[in-house]
């Protein structure tokens, strides 16, 4: 199994805009490795640094020190993003475009040929069940439909690595199940999924390995069954790892 | 290049699916048609004033469209978070800037074509003449000037936080250049040092958009064509400033966090 996502001593500091304020440290020397074909869950409470890690991996934020690489290429090189798909936490796309136009636009950015684009758009719209609404402008879509457009755009280049940031947030149970099915299907196709989420039950069902971070530090990493071995559930393990103490014991 | 054209295509689609252009175009058409249909003061030469006002409206409308369209491009992408899935693709930030610029510039070119076609039809209906080459020269330099304005606004949209403040600053800056740009050297001559050097520096540093703005006179007063080499030189001058603003925008955007 080759490593396709790697961070080494990754540190991110955000300078404060206030005078004489200490910089906010979002990540403190994060070391991660994700191998081919894995579904990797990335867990942590709010503000733990999950989205910052994804932002560094996608080149949105420059690390203060340390390094991050995708497929062995430094994430600062745009070519590192050629084989990845990304679904952000909040899916907002150009609302004046239709789903088909949006997918065609992203396909052009990946440099896909017209025939390949047509084929992929047809397959993806079928996969996310949006064929009936493909010509409608995205502004007329429900939240669940927008999330599915997001998933389709993340898959337009047939990526080897899919980065999902809270992919099921705000979805109804059917929508969640659908996303889960798609992730499982991608796993069967040998794709790698890097999956940040708060939904511990979902992570437990879908993921092979998980990492738990808190306050920018890696607290635990390993196979899901290893982490839950000494706890009744992943939730209990998670709470213990992040050091949560119930106030009403 | 394919990526830049793809980005430009989205900008153009946005412009024609929004209402801004249609509103300004209809407003200009209504005002000009009403003015052209009246025979004020029984003056046979009144068409000149109509032409002048119509061209002024075209300039104002095109600047409004260019600045407002460009000013919202990157801030709207950030605010609506469409920038994240976009930059997660194999796309450099410079390509994004150039794509946005090209889209706005081409969209403004289309807008100008519509405006000048209407202007030509209006003038021809009264004068029964269609000096196409004069219109082409004026429209071409107008478009080149819009390139400078668009590149400058794009740079502003990366520096100023809100699109409204950027639009206002760009409007004031462009209006100031158009109105007083040509007099700055004369003002400098009347001043003492070191203010004279300061004003001279400003005079040589700012893009002199008023050169193209003055091309209105060519059409209004039916002046002979300008030599093509001067048209070419003015185009190069505009392109140089456009390039400077775009490179500056790329440098500003290069390391900016977009989270």
Image (tube, rainbow, N blue to C red):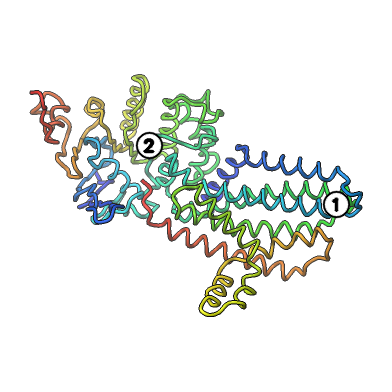
Q: Is residue A160 above or below residue A171?
A: below
Q: Which mark is residue A87?
A: 2
**Residue nearer the viewer, A222 or B140:** B140
Mark 2–mark 1 distance (CA, rounded to whole Å): 58 Å
- Marks 2 and 1 in Cβ contact (< 8 Å): no
Residue A144, position in %: x, y?
41, 25
The residue under label 1 is B47
Residue B59, position in %: x, y?
69, 53
Residue drawn at (26%, 35%), measured in percent from left and top? A39
Mark nearest the camera among 2 and 1 is 1
Q: Secondary structure at mark 1?
A: helix
Chain ID at mark 2: A
Q: Is residue B14 above or below residue B150?
A: above
Chain ID at mark 1: B
Q: Which mark is residue B246?
A: none
Residue extending farthest top: A174
Residue B227, position in %: x, y?
77, 70
Q: Is residue A98 above or below residue B240?
A: above
Residue drawn at (52%, 41%), measured in percent from left and top? A105
Residue A36, position in %: x, y?
27, 41
Within 10 angstroms of label 2, few (less than 14), some, or many (20 or more) residues? many
**Residue nearer the viewer, A169 or A221:** A169
Within 10 angstroms of label 1, few (less than 14), some, or many (20 or more) residues? many
Q: Is residue B183 above or below residue B258?
A: below
User: Is B102 displayed left or right of A200 in the figure?
Assistant: right
Residue drawn at (83%, 64%), measured in percent from left and top? B223
Can you say which quadrant of the picture contains the N terminus of chain B?
bottom right
User: Is A221 displayed left or right of A105 in the figure?
Assistant: left
Q: Total label count?
A: 2
């Amino acid at each position: 199994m080759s490593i396709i996502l790697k961070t080494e001593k990754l540190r991110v500091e955000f300078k404060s805009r206030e005078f004489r304020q200490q910089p906010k440290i979002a990540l403190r020397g994060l070391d991660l490795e994700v191998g081919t074909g894995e579904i990797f869950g990335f867990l942590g409470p709010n503000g733990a640094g999950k989205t910052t890690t994804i932002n560094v991996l996608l080149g949105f934020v420059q690390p203060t020190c340390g390094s991050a690489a995708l497929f062995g290429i430094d994430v600062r090189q745009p070519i590192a993003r050629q084989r990845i798909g990304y679904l952000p936490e909040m899916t907002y796309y150009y609302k004046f475009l239709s789903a088909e136009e949006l997918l065609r636009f992203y396909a052009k950015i990946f440099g896909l040929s017209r025939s390949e684009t047509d084929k992929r758009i047809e397959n993806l719209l079928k996969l996310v069940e949006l064929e009936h609404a493909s010509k409608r402008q995205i502004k007329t879509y429900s939240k669940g439909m927008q999330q599915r457009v997001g998933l389709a755009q993340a898959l337009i280049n047939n990526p080897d690595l899919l980065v999902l940031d809270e992919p099921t947030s705000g979805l109804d149970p059917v929508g969640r199940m659908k996303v889960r099915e798609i992730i499982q299907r991608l796993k069967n196709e040998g794709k790698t999924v890097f999956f940040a989420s708060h939904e511990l039950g979902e992570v437990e069902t879908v993921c092979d390995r998980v990492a738990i971070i808190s306050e920018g530090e890696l607290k635990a990493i390993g196979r899901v069954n290893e982490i839950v071995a000494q706890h009744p559930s992943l939730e209990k393990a998670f709470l213990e790892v992040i050091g949560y103490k119930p106030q009403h014991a | 290049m394919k990526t830049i054209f793809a980005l430009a295509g989205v900008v153009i689609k946005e412009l024609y699916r929004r209402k801004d252009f249609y509103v300004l175009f209809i407003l200009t058409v209504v005002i000009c048609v009403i003015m052209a249909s009246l025979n004020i003061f029984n003056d046979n030469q009144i068409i000149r004033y109509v032409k002048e006002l119509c061209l002024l409206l075209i300039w104002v409308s095109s600047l409004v469209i260019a600045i407002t369209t460009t000013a919202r491009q990157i801030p709207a992408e950030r605010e609506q978070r469409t920038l994240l899935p976009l930059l997660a693709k194999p796309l450099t930030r410079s390509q994004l800037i150039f794509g946005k610029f090209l889209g706005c510039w081409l969209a403004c070119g289309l807008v100008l074509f519509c405006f000048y076609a209407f202007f030509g039809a209006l003038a021809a209906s009264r004068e029964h003449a269609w000096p196409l080459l004069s219109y082409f020269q004026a429209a071409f330099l107008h478009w080149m000037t819009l390139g400078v304005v668009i590149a400058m606004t794009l740079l502003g949209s990366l520096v100023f936080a809100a699109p409204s403040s950027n639009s206002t600053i760009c409007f004031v800056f462009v209006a100031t250049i158009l109105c007083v740009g040509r007099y700055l050297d004369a003002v400098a001559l009347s001043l003492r040092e070191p203010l004279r050097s300061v004003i001279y520096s400003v005079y040589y540093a700012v893009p002199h958009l008023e050169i193209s703005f003055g091309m209105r006179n060519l059409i209004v007063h039916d002046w002979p064509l300008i030599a093509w080499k001067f048209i070419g030189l003015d185009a190069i001058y505009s392109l140089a400033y456009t390039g400077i603003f775009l490179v500056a925008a790329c440098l500003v955007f290069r390391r900016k966090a977009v989270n």
